[in-house]
Amino acid sequence: MNDELKAIDPKTVKVLKAGLDTVDISVNGKLYSNVIPRKPFPLSHPEVVLLCTEDGREIGVIEDYRKLDAKSRGELEKVLDVIYYIPRIKRINKIDHKEQKYVWKVEIEEGKDIEIVTWSRCVRIMPDGRIFIKDVNGHYYEVRSLSSLDLKSKILLGTMI
Amino acid sequence: MTKNEEKPEEAELMLFPEDVPNWIKEGLEREEDVIAIMDTELYKGRFAETSLVLTNKRVMVYRKGDILEDISLTRIEEASIRTYLNICILVIKTGGVFKGIAAFNRNRFKSLEKLVTIINNLVIGKISYELLKSSVTKESRLSEKRIFRRLFGLLRPTLPLIIVSLVLSMVLRIFDLTPPYLIKILVDEVLTPRAHIEKLYWILAALLALFIGQILLNVAKGYINTKLNLLISRIMRSAIFKKLQRTSLFYHDKFGSGGLFTRIFDDARQIQDFIANSLQSVAINAGAVVFVGAILVSLSLKLTIISILPLFITFIMAIFYSMRAPLYYFRVWRKWSNLVSTVSDALNAVLLLKSYRKEREYEEKFMKEHIGFEESQIASFKIEQTFWPPVWLVFLGCNLSIWFLGGLDVLNGVLSLGSLIAFTTYMWEFYGPIFGLIESFASFQRVKVSIERVFELLDLEEEKSGTYRAPIRGNVVFDNVWFTYDGIHYVLKNVSLDIKSGERVGIVGPSGAGKTTMAKLMLRLYEPQFGKIAVDGVDLKEYDLESLRRQVAMVMQDTPLFDISIAENITIAKPEVSPLEVMRVAKLAAAHDFIMKLPEAYDTEVGRRGAKLSGGEKARIALAAALLKDPRILILDEPTAMLDALTEDKVIEALERVTKYRTTLIIAHRLSTLKFTDRIVVLDDGRVIETGAHKELLKKGGLYAELWNSQLKGLARRQVILYER
């Protein structure tokens, strides 16, 4: 168990190289390889990043990774975008009720039509207006905000909130 | 109905009776007043009139004017009740010895409970006779309040909607009643004489206007009624909910969460239904009976008299029916309950059923219960058929008689054909409202119970907050504290304890010794009946509740979490803190590591009452939440009870760290949890029997040493078993 939480000043961190789910970093000049960046608050505070070694030891926590220098931030986001990928919903076309589940037909920002199956309580609204939809397998989908949707999508989403 | 059921409670227990029987009066001393007289039908296991008399000086048991027991209040240490199969015994403690002095039937338990509370108030609480008298009189005054007047007072904001809805309903009723009259004119003035074609157009136009009006008014009435229903339910439910948030935990224990749910939802719905629907129908139906009755008389007095006859016959039949039918309906309800509880047992204890191979047995039980339910339904259908077909036969006979006699009148030119058609139509409009009024009476009886239950809650006393606000240093004193949940059985008896600021005190003792109760009293979730608890020399009653509870935190062994995320549960008392602060306290509480193993980490929703987490995980989240408050006084109730040995060690280490320099009360069964405490207090049967450091208590060889040794033996036994495996 790591007893104390070590906050790291983003100015002291350089992200040197990004792998698929790990990064090589230096903190105050000390090198760490294969570091796993983890978000302790992936939905409510996605800017907080906890850096851990492969064996689970915590190096420290960055309160807001967006304060890293541009290159480091870019490298880190390469990994974060992979391991914390959440499809963003652009339009909701239809919601059907089938056998106590709800089947959503939605279009995501990548332009693809997909189907999401949820239980009745599946919507989480964050204080900053972002909306998350959780499917029956625990997979999340994001709506940037209610105002980013067209009228029909708003009405359909309104029936689930 | 038995004799006892007929007897109201007041008849069993007379408090401050004005007419004291002479045979009691004669035995009273100077300045001796009777507080209560309670009759019992039992004496030495036989039915025999016996009376228990409580005065401001003693408790006496009389039989046929002779005193069987006479105990001075100054000798009484405590009163209590022992309950048996059918009997409860009033037990009095004198000189450290309990003695039963009178036996009562179990159906008098409530009265006896009240009496015991009064005796304890006098002997333990040393409450004065005058104060006792004023509190009892106040209690009886409260119960006499007029509930209906209060209900309408509460629902005053709905009055405009009620009036609009009532007016719309009456206009609609008039619209409903008009077409038969127009048809009478059509038959008599247009169709029969085959003349006045222009009247045909007018009548049809009027009918069309009426139908369109009915549609529009129905829409308007539906809208108003929906608003009215919603407003009533909001007023009722929010009043109850608000009250429940502000009352002491004592009432939550008393009514139970199931009972409170029923009152918030079912009783409030009954009242809403009554006000929005039944009450209106009374007004409308009463108006319709008078209005339609007048039309019927104007059409034909003779036929009106005939049409009233079936009502009398039905009324007599209904009396006989109401004497038999409820038994059958109750049987249906009972059979249905049996069926539901069989299914519920089978589903809740599925593991047990499977492990004992009881599946087949429960399948058969289910079938048996279901067949029983079906039979009860058929029986109730049959009993209904002994009432309704004869009733309809009576009404059919009446209808035929009216057609026959009315037809003769038409043929004889006494009555017009239109009048006869209108009469037969109005006749049914006359019966409908009468049956409606009978139904309203039944629903009035049902709702009366609901209103009483709701006002019972609304009348509850709210938690009283003092005004004292100051940073707490953490000196806690229990000064001769007595506490009981039910007024009879004292969980804490004369507890005195002095805890210094920053001291870490362990509370141990057998189950039911009163450990958790002490913790709850410190948070002022309950108030002691006698004695006082002071923090930094100030009585807890004087503290502003918000300020006190902000500085005192309690972690229970099975803390129910809210159905929100882990982060939100931790920050429940301080939502404004940063994510890093949340992680910091989670680490202190040894919760961070398991949280980070969850895919959604701190954003994981914990489910209803934290169902998605284990007991140990919930305990650690609760500890983190408590630490975030940075309390001056920390109360931990079995903090490691749900943990495995490895995690327990981690949590104990964490506790040792976080409790340093903080007044801490740790309640524990596992004595190993208390290794870092400064002092251990041993409770037994509500009393402090030992206090001291771990080594001192072991040396003493008392209850603590006994508990410690038995835990050591248990541990050794487990190790031997593991080794042998």
Image (cartoon, rainbow, N blue to C red):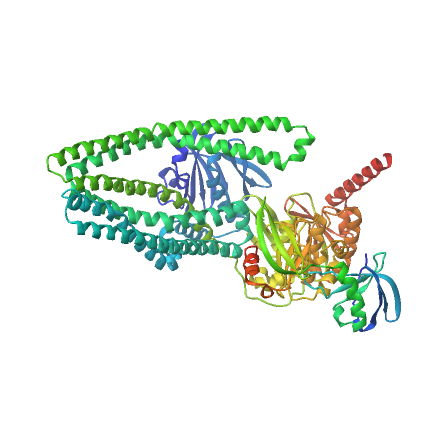
> Which quadrant, please, contains the N terminus of chain A?
bottom right
Nearest the viewer among B612 and B530 is: B612
Image location of residue B274, percent across then percent down: 38, 48
With B321 as the anchor, is B401 left or right in this view? left
Nearest the viewer among B323 and B229 is: B229
Image location of residue B667, percent across then percent down: 69, 50
Nearest the viewer among B164 and A157 is: A157
> Which quadrant, please, contains the C terminus of chain A?
bottom right
Q: Quadrant of residue B389?
A: top left
- Tally of numbered discs: 0
Image location of residue B158, percent across then percent down: 38, 58
With B384 as the anchor, is B315 left or right in this view? left
Residue at the spot 17% in from the left edge and 49% down from the top edge: B197
Would you place residue B552 above or below residue B492 in this image?
below
**Is residue B604 among what the camera can see?**
yes
Nearest the viewer among B239 and A126 is: A126
Residue at the spot 89% in from the left edge and 68% down from the top edge: A30
**Is residue B31 among what the camera can see?**
no
With A54 as the anchor, is B267 left or right in this view? left
Q: Quadrant of residue A158?
A: bottom right
Image location of residue B434, percent across then percent down: 28, 41
